[in-house]
Each structure stands twice: as C-alpha cells, then as structure tokens.
Amino acid sequence: MDISLITSLYRAEAYWEIYARGVADVARQLREAHVSLEMVLVANDPSEQERVCLHDLADTLQTSQTGSAVTLEVPRETVYASWNRGVRAATAQALGIWNVDDLRTAEGLIEGYRLIADGCEMVEFPFVIVYMQRWPGIFNTRRRREHPPQYTPSALGRKTRLGPFFMFSRALYDAAGPFDEHFCISGDFEWCARPRVRSSKLCIASAVGGYFSQHGTNLSGTHSALEDIEDNVVLLRYGMWRELRPVDPHQMQAVWTTWGDQDTLLPQDIQDRLWGAGAYGTWQRWLRHRRRQRLSEMLRRGPRWIIDWLGLRSVLARAGIVKSSVPRRLE
C-alpha cells in the first residue's frame, strides 16, 4: 500500500454517513492517480450499528477496487492508544490520521505521499476550519476560515503545533516512538514536541489537507480544563515555561506526579506557579478573565451570525449598515 490512514472510532454514528462517503470518494480519486489507500479502522467498544457501518465501508472499498480496510475491535481506550494500534497494523510507509468528524482531500494525500516518497519525514498542510454555529434545535450556519500550516519546530507552542491533517513516514514514527497513551487530548502535541520529530525533514504541502469541523464537542480546540492540563504537561516536559496556563492546581499536580513527569526536574518557581500556595487564586482569576473574553466574543459575533443566518447581509450592506464581505460557506 502507498498510504495508510488510521481512524479511531467511538460512538461515531452521527458522523458516519459523511465520513464513509468522503473515504469512498477520496479512495476513488487516489486510484485514478495510481495511489493505493488502506484504511485502518480501530473501533472502540463498537455498537452493532457501527459494526454494520464498518462492514459496509470495507465492502465498498473492496468491491470498487479503490482501496482496502482493516478493522480492529478493541475495548475503549485513549485515541492515542488506537493510533498506535493502527500504525502497527498499517502496511504503508506514508501514514496519517483521518478523524471521523473531519474530511480529508485527495489532493493533499497525493501530494503528501509523493513528498514522503521523495524523502520528507513529516508533511504539514494548510487546512480549513468549518465552524458549525448552533441555534436552538438546529445547525444553522457554516463558516469557514483557512489556516496556513502552523507547525513551527523552532518556536513550538500551543498555537504552533501540528495541524489535524499531518502525514508522517513510518521511519519517523519508529525513530520518535509511539504516541504517549496517557494523553486523552494532547498526545499529538507531545509527539511533535519530541526532539526527533522537531529535527525531522519537514515539508510544507501546497494542497489543502482537509476540512476540520469545529462543532463544540471536539476533543481538541475547546479549551477544556483537561486540554489545558495536558498541554501544560507537554510544556513542562520540554521546558516551554512561557506558555503555561493557570489550571486547577490539585489536578495539575496529580497528573504530573502520576504520569506526566518523565524524570523532568522542575524549577521550584514553576512548581509554585502551578500548584503552590497562590496557584488556586491565580487559576480563579484566569477563569474569570476567560469568561469575560468569551462573553465579549459572543456579544461581538452574535449579531453577525444572525445577519448571515437570515441572509440579510447584502440588503444591509446596500444600506451601508454592515460590510458586504462574508465568510465563504461550505455547501
């Protein structure tokens, strides 16, 4: 196989129809470009409906001769345990992840495969975030914003980590080691912070890698308490003190002392900052600041969402009330 893509699944029925259609379409385009695709589907504690869906997708790829599928059923585990399991089962040298609620592009996969075949160890892609805005009972608007590749090994941080559509060579994975399965959200951030990954031959693709759906229930990008704690673990492991965030000091210390610490010696002032005597008050002030930020953002964006939802922008623009530009929508 030329490309192996790993998907970790758990109660994914809501996304399955669009995902399966996307896989079938991409597989067809790859076949036309003479690039073979293997999907490695790791089903965590699958329901009967998921088993049927998995069988149907594997059958579709096989009967159309556009690709193949390997299905693994496992008890529920972290997403990074499933990624590691998928990499072990994969047969290609060019590897990537396909999250069930996202869509990858054939153009990106073809370019990524060819770059890896030419010697690249890591490929980063520009991508598109699709924001799903929910109003009572429905998803009413879809806005998109394009992002350039964001992984910056020389200045790695919260905002310069790997995007959701990166590809990597098997040789790099073998050299850097598997994803840390303790993480629930930030395991890819930890992996890309490792010295071997940061020193790898990185190539930036020109094709859009895919469409990332921001629907509010994503594992990452939601600024959850667990994500902030796990990000802090990564930052602590690799000495990136400048980007540490205030978090629940008791949870932070518990995570660090149970599995986060990998023989990393922390300066006393950093320990005091995260779980010292004044850490709880700092965390509470941070939470209040974040709530004010979110409220301000809602008040600023709310009228814009309503105008776009009702289709009033062109009318109001002609009256000089709003600007005529509007984020492009994905159909």
Image (tube, rainbow, N blue to C red):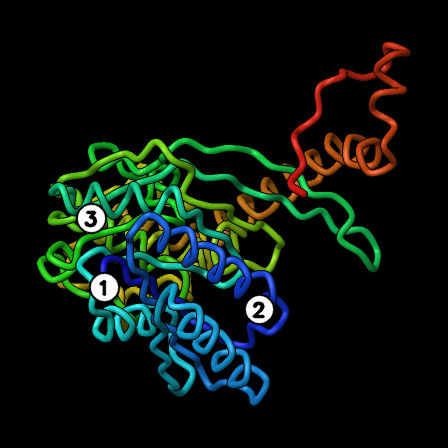
- Secondary structure, mark 2, is helix
Q: Which residue is mark 1?
A: 1
Relative side of 325 to 144, left or right: right
Which of discs 2 and 1 lies nearer the camera? The answer is: 1
Where residue 39 sits in the image (x, y, percent)?
36, 68
CB within 8 Å, label 2 to label 1: no
- Secondary structure, mark 1, is loop
Location of residue 259 by image quarter:
bottom left
Where residue 101 sits in the image (x, y, percent)?
54, 60
Give the residue type that dot 2 points to. Trp
Location of residue 240 by image quarter:
top left
Residue at image x 27%, y 38%?
Answer: 156
> Could you classify mark 2 by the number of other residues whose Cα lies within 10 Å: few (under 14), some (14-19), or many (20 or more)?
some
- Secondary structure, mark 3, is loop
- Point out the image quarter for the N terminus: bottom left
Where residue 12 sits in the image (x, y, percent)?
55, 72
Give the residue type that dot 3 points to. Tyr
Vertical relation: 254 (above or below) 139? below
> Could you classify mark 3 by the number of other residues whose Cα lies within 10 Å: few (under 14), some (14-19), or many (20 or more)?
some
Looking at the picture, tell me which residue is in the foreground, 283 or 18: 18
Vertical relation: 5 (above or below) 208? below
Looking at the picture, tell me which residue is in the foreground, 278 or 244: 244
User: Which circle marks residue 176 in the picture?
Assistant: none
Q: Which residue is mark 3?
A: 238
Q: Which residue is mark 2?
A: 16
Location of residue 179 by image quarter:
bottom left
- Point out the image quarter for the C terminus: top right
Q: CA distance from mark 3 to mark 2?
A: 37 Å
Give the residue type that dot 1 points to. Met
Looking at the picture, tell me which residue is in the foreground, 212 or 282: 212
